[in-house]
């Protein structure tokens, strides 16, 4: 091999290795690591060796169909992935992909289309906001990135079950340790607004309906009808009628 081609090959290898990080798939199977994402609550749970460890708030697809459901694997790990579509380099504060990318083999793709990744807009985490990826806070996805190797299984679903129950129903042996609730222990700081979804919204809708402010049903989705009901309630209570349920409106409603 001519010297110039050898130099080019070595240089290319090191450039690629600076972006991609991974370990053999077998290590994931032996470690018993598992990630479950529940779109109904927009929460991600991390299991290690059969034990539930942590839960995180995430952002998922703007429409239910955008974020694929099923059993997948992490097939690629990238630090500071460039946002090619917007011509934004990795590590740039403007980069909407954040500082870590955990690519999934979903819908016939191989880690380049769907992923668990960071985001440069923290206020979007917890909502239905993406084109299909799963968004996390940068600091939290960085922690998760360091825990899981390539090959780690990822289950994405929409369910009212606890994370332990979801894991068990998918053939994952759950051992002792902390239980994995379907909803975070405390959501008192969560702001509900148009586009929000999940049990907290159902609780809000039930409360509004009981007070005479119809939301046209209890479906767990904060749409136009729920927003209008919130505005009417706020106006009657002489609150700022912005249709957003923050700490002041929650207190007036008597919900946490």
Image (cartoon, rainbow, N blue to C red):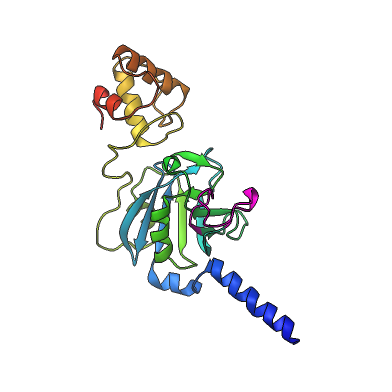
Residue lying farthest right? 2
Residue at position x 63%, y 48% from top? Answer: 86
Residue at position x 31%, y 12% from top? Answer: 236
Residue 186 place in picture, x, y as percent: 26, 42
Name the foreground residue: 252 vs 14: 14
Residue 149 place in picture, x, y as percent: 45, 68
Where does the magenta region start and end?
A: 82-101
Residue 12 falls in image quadrant: bottom right
Residue 143 place in picture, x, y as percent: 38, 60
Whether residue 188 appears in magenta in the rendering, the answer is: no
Q: Is residue 24 above or below residue 36?
A: below
Quadrant that contains the N terminus: bottom right
Quadrant that contains the C terminus: top left
Q: Is residue 2 above or below residue 92?
A: below
Residue lying farthest top? 236
Q: Is residue 253 left or right of residue 100?
A: left
Q: Is residue 35 left or right of residue 129?
A: left
Q: Is residue 185 visible?
A: yes
Name the foreground residue: 147 vs 208: 147
């Amino acid at each position: 091999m001519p010297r110039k081609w050898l130099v080019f090959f070595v240089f290319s290898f090191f450039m690629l290795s600076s972006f991609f990080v991974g370990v053999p798939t077998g290590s994931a199977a032996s470690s018993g690591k598992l990630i479950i994402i529940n779109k109904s609550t927009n929460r991600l749970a991390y299991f290690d060796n059969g034990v539930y460890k942590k839960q995180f708030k995430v952002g998922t697809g703007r429409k239910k169909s955008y974020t694929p459901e099923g059993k997948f694997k992490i097939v690629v790990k990238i630090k500071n992935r460039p946002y090619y579509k917007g011509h934004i380099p990795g590590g740039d504060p403007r980069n909407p992909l954040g500082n870590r990318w955990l690519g999934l083999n979903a819908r016939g793709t191989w880690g380049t289309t769907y992923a668990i990744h960071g985001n440069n807009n923290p206020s979007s985490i917890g909502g239905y906001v993406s084109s299909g990826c799963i968004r996390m806070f940068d600091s939290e996805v960085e922690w998760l990135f360091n825990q899981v190797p390539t090959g780690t299984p990822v289950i994405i679903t929409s369910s009212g079950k606890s994370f332990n129950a979801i894991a068990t129903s998918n053939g994952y042996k759950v051992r002792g340790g902390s239980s994995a609730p379907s909803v975070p222990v405390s959501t008192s700081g969560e702001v509900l607004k148009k586009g929000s979804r999940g049990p907290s919204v159902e609780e809000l809708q039930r409360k509004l309906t009981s007070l005479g402010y119809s939301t046209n049903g209890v479906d767990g989705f904060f749409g136009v009808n729920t927003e209008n009901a919130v505005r009417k309630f706020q106006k009657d209570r002489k609150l700022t009628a912005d249709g957003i349920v923050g700490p002041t409106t929650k207190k007036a409603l008597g919900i946490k």
